[in-house]
Amino acid sequence: MSAAFLTPSPTDAAAAPAPDSGSCLANQPGDCVDGQVAQSLRIGAVFIILACSSIGVWLPYVMGKFSWVGRETNIFLILKAFGAGVILATGFIHMFPDATKQFENPCLGWPDYPYASLFALVTIIAVLFLEHLVSMAYEKRMMKQLARPHSPEDGCANGACVPELDEKVIAQKDARIRSFAIAQVLETGIALHSVLIGIALGVSNSPCTIRPLLAAITFHQFFEGIALGSCLIQAEFRSWAFALMAFLFAITTPVGVAIGIGIQSTYNENSLANLIVSGVFDSVSTGILIYMALVDLIAVDFTTKRFRNSLVLQVGSYLGLAGGCAVMAIIGIWA
């Protein structure tokens, strides 16, 4: 579900190979084109997607207010597994094929090479390094606290002693910092491709294309919202921070639609600049989403002692994971 949002420059036109049909220099009209109907659908799409995205990202937060679905319950962990499946399938089924398609476009004229895989691989390593930096910074902070001198009034034998910190408290703080970083990176990856799919809808003049694409994007954003909302809750954001993150997620696709509407009359999906930018963005999103799903969500929750000791949690989590993958795989038929 990638999009085109940059118009071709004279340099693009000169550099791109020009087949007999001229498809690298202009978009080909479709059989189902109705500007007025398409414009109405595009405007309506802004509000429909905004509403469904908001409902999806806020649903875990609202459900978390009930004790039977709190953060420590099996239901919440199963919901997280479902979200992990959504994110994983989004990377493999929605992002990676689109990135590959952009780089394989004959209008690009680049040598044959799996560029999408390369950019995704670099992104995965970069995210791994980013998480390493966050962990190192947190460890240094904790060491400084441990090395800080305390007075005898604090229960120490002399002025240079340090208190013993509860290992459980340290582990909880470490998990919270990690969850915070995961949520930030995950939202970045989701935002990149959410804008692109919004632009894809906004530039279309074909009601026959917009209607199924709108339905697919609506469900796509709803389920991605559930996945993101679960991660935000896990990170224990304050209410105002959660609201801000939820708002940013909810408006990304509508903003993309608005951009698409604004450039609809001038854009060229086959321009060199568009193919490169769209391909890179989709590749980066692929790397982020796949890494987050496998390393920070599935590997963490599916290897705990609690998971191994609970058959109900195991069955529910695997069903949730498969369900999330299945939902996005089905949506991939239309988008």
Image: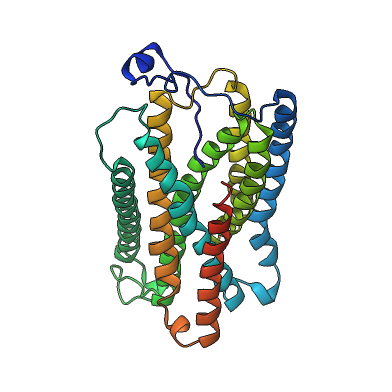
The image shows residue 72, relative to residue 225, as above or below, that is: below
**Residue 59 pos. (x, y %):** 68, 59
- Judging depth in this view, the residue of 179 and 7 nearest the camera is 7
**Residue 220 pos. (x, y %):** 60, 51
The image shows residue 19, relative to residue 299, as above or below, that is: above
Q: Residue at x 63, y 40 (%)?
A: 251
Q: Please tell me in which quadrant of the rendered image residue 11 appears.
A: top left
Q: Residue at x 62, y 42 (%)?
A: 213
Q: Is residue 174 left or right of residue 226?
A: left
Residue lying furthest front in this view? 20
Q: Is residue 117 visible?
A: yes
Q: Please tell me in which quadrant of the rendered image residue 198 appears.
A: top right
The image shows residue 11, relative to residue 136, as above or below, that is: above
**Residue 10 pos. (x, y %):** 39, 11
- Judging depth in this view, the residue of 118 and 330 nearest the camera is 330
Marks counted in the figure total: 0
- Judging depth in this view, the residue of 193 and 16 nearest the camera is 16
- Judging depth in this view, the residue of 14 and 303 nearest the camera is 14
Q: Please tell me in which quadrant of the rendered image residue 256 appears.
A: top right
Q: Is residue 73 visible?
A: no
Q: Is residue 128 left or right of residue 187?
A: left
Q: Residue at x 29, y 51 (%)?
A: 125
